[in-house]
Image: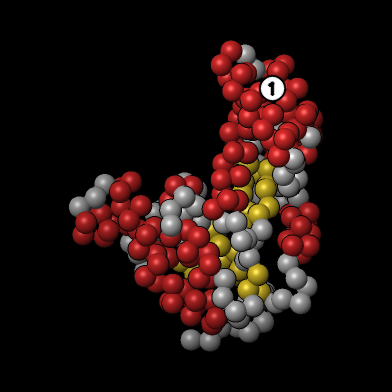
Amino acid sequence: MNRDPEIATITINLDPGVRILTYAPDIDIRDYIILEEVMEEYELGPNGAMILASDLMVNYLDDLKDEIDDFNADWILVDTAGQLELFAFRETGPLIASALGFGSIQRSVSFLFDSNLVLRPNGFISTLLLAASVQFRFRDIPQINILSKVDLLDEDQIEMIVNWSQDFKALEESTSERESGLIRELSMDLSEVFVQMGSTAELIPCSIKEENGLDLLFGYLQRIFDSDKSKFY
């Protein structure tokens, strides 16, 4: 079935276990995989069924690509499972990302730094390690790091966290001041590694609730993608 050729953006849900979404996806993996049916057929609990369901998605790549083609959209927003081990750290994740990036589609991975978890240096460093791991897993795809839920932070906190992402010496100093014991020692060692490696991409502060920072994020995406390409996700 052909869709509206003028549509600008579509959304894809690739989380087979999600119960409630705050948006109505245009394409939904749950149309092909039902978690409860996977649990029953393979006699698995919720966690095991989620892992298997994530792997089973590769069986429906052609269906997903056909649906994407039908929409003829300019932008494709893909929402994956929040648990990294279900997508980023399984072989199926990079495989799906590569398969959906067909034709003229340009791709970018967006990694979210949860504001609740990065207010202390050790939490920031832990999240930074996860971001680096995801970037390694999807090494052929540009990655944008986003500081999410900034409506929960004040301006000084946002500035501090963004500064950590740009100046690892500042992160090292904060680690020395705010951590203690084994956590301080380990965090200092890790921050020194990042100092030696050099800075990663700047964090982009965003709030979906207040719709802050979305224009900045859009600008980053535009700079990443070739202006001659027509499809993005």
The percent coordinates of residue 104 (x first, y second) are: 64, 78
**Which residue is identified by label 1?**
175
Residue 166 picture quarter: top right
Residue at (67%, 82%) from the top-left corner? Answer: 6
- Identity of the residue furthest to the bottom in this view: 2
Q: Is residue 105 left or right of residue 57?
A: right
Residue at (56%, 62%) from the top-left corner? Answer: 78
Image: 162 above or below 21: above
Image: 118 above or below 31: above
Q: How is the image coloured?
A: secondary structure
Taking depth in this image into account, of 196 and 181 the one nearest to the observer is: 196
Residue at (47%, 58%) from the top-left corner? Answer: 93
Residue 190 picture quarter: top right
Q: Is residue 103 left or right of residue 48?
A: right
The percent coordinates of residue 52 (x first, y second) are: 32, 56
Q: Is residue 29 left or right of residue 26?
A: left
The percent coordinates of residue 44 (x first, y second) are: 24, 50
The percent coordinates of residue 177 (x first, y second) are: 72, 16
Taking depth in this image into account, of 161 and 3 the one nearest to the observer is: 161
Amino acid at the residue labelled 1: Thr
Residue at (35%, 52%) from the top-left corner? Answer: 51
Image: 140 above or below 84: below
Label 1 neighbour load within 10 Å: few <14, some 14-19, many 20+: many
Q: Where the C terminus falls, by quadrant?
A: bottom right
Mark count: 1
Q: Is residue 60 visible?
A: yes
Q: Is residue 119 visible?
A: no
Label 1 residue SS: helix
Image: 89 above or below 108: above
